[in-house]
Amino acid sequence: MVVHIVMFKFKEENKKANMIQAKQMLDNLMGTVPSLRSMDVGMNFCEEERAMDLSIITSFEGREGLDAYAVHPEHLKVVDFIKSVVEYSKVVDYERA
């Protein structure tokens, strides 16, 4: 099993609306991308300076599934939108038993 975690820091302009739209778009990938086994999308409520705004935790059967997700056309649409509204993101990918 491969776990893919991404955390996003959104730009201030239209921040709340963009976060809601990104969450909806990400949620819609479940059932659309065949290799995606699970997805949890969360909007942050912590107000610490180090906090990120939105995170996803996804899982795949293996690295091949993550690779297929990365290039899936519906995922790429979400990536294009998110890239236009975030300052930066951080990612962690790991294998678990």
Image (spheres, rainbow, N blue to C red):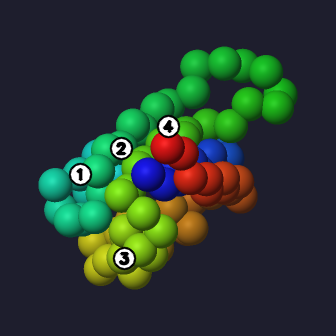
In primary-sequence order, the first of circles 4 and 1 is 4
- The mark that comes first in sequence, 3 or 2, is 2
Is residue 70 visible in the rendered structure shown here? no
Residue type of the residue flagged with mark 2: Met
**At x 55% / y 39%, what residue is drawn?**
54
Q: Which residue is mark 4?
A: 16
Residue at image mark 2: 39
Cα separation between marks 1 and 3 = 14 Å
Residue 34 rendering spot, x and y as whole percentages = 21, 65
Task: Indicate the amino acid at tag 1.
Answer: Met
Q: Identify which amino acid the numbered label 3 is placed on.
A: Ala
Separation (CA) of disc 1 from disc 2:
7 Å
86 relative position to 50: left or right: left
For the residues carrying marks 2 and 4, which lies nearer the camera in this image?
A: 2
- Residue 80: x and y in percent read 46, 73
- Location of mark 1 (residue): 30
Secondary element type, mark 3:
helix
Asked if residue 92 lies left or right of residue 40, the reply is: right
Callout 3 crowding tier (Cα within 10 Å): few <14, some 14–19, many ≥20: some
**Residue beneath label 3, please?**
68
Q: Nearer the viewer, mark 3 or mark 4?
A: 3
